[in-house]
Amino acid sequence: MKHIRNFCIIAHIDHGKSTLADRLLEYTATISQREAQAQLLDNMDLERERGITIKSHAIQMNYKVGDIEYNFNLIDTPGHVDFSYEVSRSIAACEGALLIVDASQGIQAQTISNLYLALEHDLEIIPILNKMDLPGAMPEEVKDQIIDLIGCKREDIIPASGKTGLGIPDIIQAIVDRVPAPVGDPEAPLQALIFDSVFNSFRGIIAYYKVVNGEIKKGDKVKFINTGKEYLADEVGILKLDMAPRSVVKTGDVGYIISGIKEAREVKVGDTITTVGRPAEGAIQGFEEVKPMVFAGIYPVDTDDFEELREAMHKLQLNDASIVFEPESSAALGFGFRCGFLGMLHMEIIQERLEREFDMTVITTVPNVSYIAHTTKGVEITVNNPSDLPDPSKLDSVEEPFIKANIITKAEFVGPVMSLCIQKRGIIVNQSYLTSDRVELVFEMPMGEIVFDFYDKLKTISKGYASFDYHQVGYRKSDLVRLDMLINDEPVDALSSLIHRSNAYDFGKKICEKLRELIPRQQFEIKIQASIGAKVIARETLSALRKDVTAKCYGGDISRKRKLLEKQKKGKKRMRQVGNVEIPQSAFMAVLKLD
């Protein structure tokens, strides 16, 4: 056991985690030249296309230092704030972390938040200065920033380059010297923490775990503590580039188990595996529940596909434990799911994955956050969907979730960033200069305001230099109203939203104008209205397509024409009563990109 090292790689977006992992795999000869490719651990097409890591990937490397052979279990993690749950799970399975900082960009917001996650779990931090080969690298300045942040010695920081392979031997040596071996009792009853799982259509569900105490053998009868279900361990093994079967996985190792589980609901990330013969006292503690930040409805385009969508969502939840969903129905879209995501990028990725991996084309409704409504009778209601909000006459007050946002930016962008945050109802709490050129701004602002396009705008006005990280700070009272969209006096529940009263008029007007562009014209007039309760605050009219019915009347008496026009008028009136308006998918999405 003292020759095992479990560590993960943490950093901000684009600081070179996956590239450095590639070099480590090549240096330890875990992969051959033939298998080598860039971002080797990112095995999803989507990850390669976008150049981002979405999933954490675990792999074992064996390497001899001196005469001793070491087992390195490496987990490469994502950098985006939307996938921070993946990072927290990876950290729970490790004893050390490589903290990578880009030598040309310095420390950014996600660097700090991922570092705090690692420190909470008492991990040994090895700071690495990456991208040293870039002409814009500022090693000395960035080293000062790292020393300020974690208080290490200057000589502890390892200069490296994921591109050229500089510093890789030093990193390996530092892992051996500084990362502690896992602590656990090989003689105790088995306790293994599940930190990930995948669905395989031939073998059922494969769970990945780290053995904390005891050992797991092939053919053991095992039990999952949280669900109470029992299985036979058909195959156990460790994670190389592919899965490598072993007869036993010992204390401190990271491995997989195949036990023919068919139901996705039976495997929970954070659950503990133990043996039936010698069960452990209790489950492993310290695994946090995920807190979804953005809620949106996902509906199948064809209502008959509802059950298929449910299956797809369950399989996706295995692979991405941070998605939360429950069934709901909408008058406009039929049956679907109310889903909780960690952010807008997460929502986009889930939608992409549903289409690619499961061939499900879905409609996504306007994202929102969850509110707490207090009725006049003193009842508290959690509102995840705008249509759940009680009638204004029965409503006493509404509370909305607030966040504390940390924005790190260059000094020249402070003005635009502040005006953006204030426009989004933010209140500045603190402003501090980290260096002469880098400012940290701390705001308190409503969660609902950052759901739509805040991050994109922040990136635009700061030319990509601002980094953003946030956490929730509870609920506060707010003057919120429900804005309903009516089309021909019929409310479209998928377009309704909860919004602050001060923004309602502008927002309503913009949506009406946008819908007028997007809804195809019919043979009858369509009126598009935005209303708060019974009060209409904006209206647009989509004029009718008119068929020229008098074209065939050539000359002759005017009464012939009048007769035809009267007939057309009656037909139009009847059509308006029975005609319904199809709203295209682009209209639901356009609401997100209003500005």
Image (tube, grey):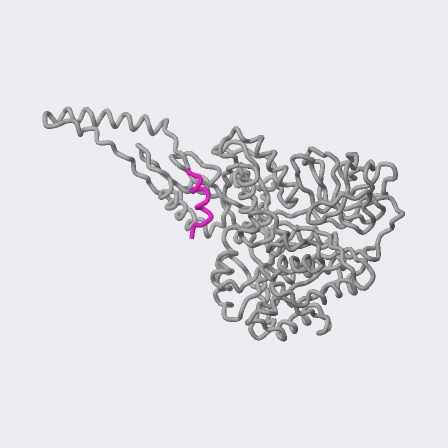
Closest to the observer, 82 or 257: 257
Q: Which image quadrant for residue 534?
A: top left
- Is residue 588 covered in magenta? yes
Name of the residue lying farthest toward the left? 556
Identify which residue, 486 or 39, lies in the foreground.
39
Q: Where is residue 415 in the image (x, y as percent from the top left)?
A: 49, 67
Bounds of the magenta span? 584-595
Give the x, y percent position of residue 40. Answer: 62, 53
Q: Where's residue 93, x and y in %?
A: 74, 52
User: Which residue appears farthest toward the front when viewing the image?
Assistant: 34
Q: Residue 304: within the magenta?
A: no
- The answer to which quarter of the image holds residue 428 is bottom right
Quick check: 393 left or right of 519? right
Q: Is residue 398 visible?
A: no
Q: Where is residue 147 in the image (x, y as percent from the top left)?
A: 69, 71
**Residue at (65% x, 43% y) in the render:** 319
Side (left or right) of 460 relative to 194:
left
**Residue 161 against residue 310 in the figure, above or below:** below
Q: Residue at image x 48%, y 65%?
A: 416
